[in-house]
């Protein structure tokens, strides 16, 4: 009887995992690492799961489209990748497993539209170029990161979209690659033989640093870190893509998210479009991932700001 019960439980777990892999787990109790869901006031995301006492989870994260994989960077400082790691959690056999280390010295994991490639920033640079790295999904896991883009100008917060257009922050000046106060959210057009980049211009960008952002996969909106100060404390704002290809003037996500001076970056919207996750804090000592209900706020701001 016990053996039969055990076999049935194993079969149930295998079937459940298979169904989750096919349909996703977004509407189940296991979604979002099984965390209690937030409302319209930000809360700490997965505080006791992702980081150890001497590290913190931060920067942009990435869920797979079916919600059964979660990738995120960890570190013990903001300004060095020496101890940085990309870790992941995976839902298998009816539970979340991990965290495991995927790679070291990289950050900003970002899925391709088909979820078969992960892009990263960081890595071992040469001091002369900016790199975007890629790993490919295989039956045994992910390949080691390899160079996807190598450019003499700055590249930061790289994000692909469903159309094939990619976005990144850059000042587009090879001689000023590290002049971050001049970075703009920019559009990358790539062909088999060439890559062109141009700033999205005003009103999306300002004279200061405009480097942290999240663009929807359908390019319908961009969430940006706006009103950036020289120490990079900022607020989260949103701009919508108009029919003529231009962008609306950015609008604040409101006082519950922008509740005073703080670093806010690594913005990311879950694949089901329900929650915004971002990094926040005043220093590495209090840095953490926050999350908040986003779909209702998105609909409200779209109605208020997108008139065409």
Image: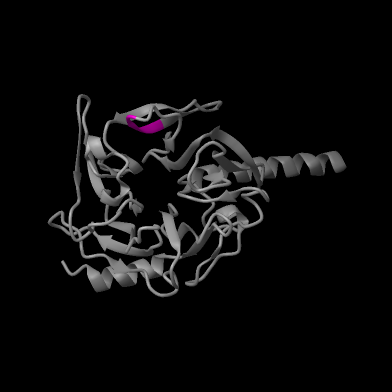
Residue drawn at 57 percent across, 40 percent down: 87
The N terminus sits in image quarter: top right
Q: Name the side, left or right, on which 4 lies relative to 189.
A: right
SS majority, magenta: strand
Q: Name the side, left or right, on which 110 lies relative to 142.
A: left
Residue drawn at 40 percent across, 31 percent down: 133
- Front residue (pair 243, 229): 229
Magenta region, residue range: 128-133
- Residue 17: image location, x then y, percent: 61, 43
Q: Name the side, left or right, on which 259 lies relative to 172.
A: right
- Front residue (pair 156, 217): 156
- Residue 158: image location, x then y, percent: 34, 42
- Residue 234: image location, x then y, percent: 38, 63
The stretch drawn in magenta includes residue 177: no
User: Can the viewer see residue 275 in this picture?
Assistant: no
Question: Would you place residue 303 above or below residue 115 in this image?
Answer: below
The C terminus sits in image quarter: bottom left
Q: Name the side, left or right, on which 75 lies relative to 266.
A: right
- Front residue (pair 203, 229): 229
- Residue 135: image location, x then y, percent: 45, 30
Structure colour scheme: one colour
User: Can the viewer see residue 213 in this picture?
Assistant: yes
Residue drawn at 51 percent across, 55 percent down: 26
Residue closest to the far left:
244
Count of marks placed on residues = 0
Quarter of the rendering containing residue 177: top left
């Amino acid at each position: 009887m016990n053996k039969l019960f055990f076999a049935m439980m194993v079969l149930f777990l295998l079937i459940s995992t298979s169904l989750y892999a096919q349909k996703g787990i977004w509407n189940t109790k296991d979604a979002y690492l099984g965390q209690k869901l937030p409302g319209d006031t930000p809360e700490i995301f997965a505080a006791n799961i992702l980081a150890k006492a001497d590290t913190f989870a931060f920067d942009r994260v990435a869920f797979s489209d079916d919600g059964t994989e979660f990738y995120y960077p960890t570190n013990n400082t903001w300004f060095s990748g020496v101890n940085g790691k990309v870790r992941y959690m995976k839902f298998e056999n009816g539970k979340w497993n991990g965290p495991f280390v995927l790679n070291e010295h990289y950050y900003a994991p970002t899925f391709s539209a088909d979820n078969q490639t992960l892009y990263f920033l960081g890595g071992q640079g040469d001091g002369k170029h900016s790199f975007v790295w890629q790993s490919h999904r295989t039956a045994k896991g992910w390949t080691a990161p390899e160079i996807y883009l190598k450019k003499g100008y700055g590249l930061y917060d790289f994000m692909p979209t469903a159309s094939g257009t990619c976005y990144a922050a850059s000042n587009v000046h090879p001689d000023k690659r590290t002049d971050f106060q001049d970075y703009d959210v920019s559009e990358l057009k790539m062909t088999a033989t060439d890559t062109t980049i141009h700033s999205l211009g005003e009103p999306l960008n300002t004279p200061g640093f405009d480097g942290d952002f999240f663009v929807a996969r359908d390019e319908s909106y961009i969430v940006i870190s706006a009103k950036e100060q020289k120490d990079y404390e900022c607020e989260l704002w949103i701009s919508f893509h108009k029919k003529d290809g231009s962008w609306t003037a950015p609008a604040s996500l409101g006082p519950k998210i922008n509740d005073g001076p703080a670093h806010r970056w690594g913005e990311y919207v879950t694949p089901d479009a329900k929650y915004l996750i971002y990094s926040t804090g005043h220093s590495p000592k209090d840095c953490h991932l926050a999350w908040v209900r986003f779909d209702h706020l998105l609909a409200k701001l779209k109605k208020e700001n997108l008139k065409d």
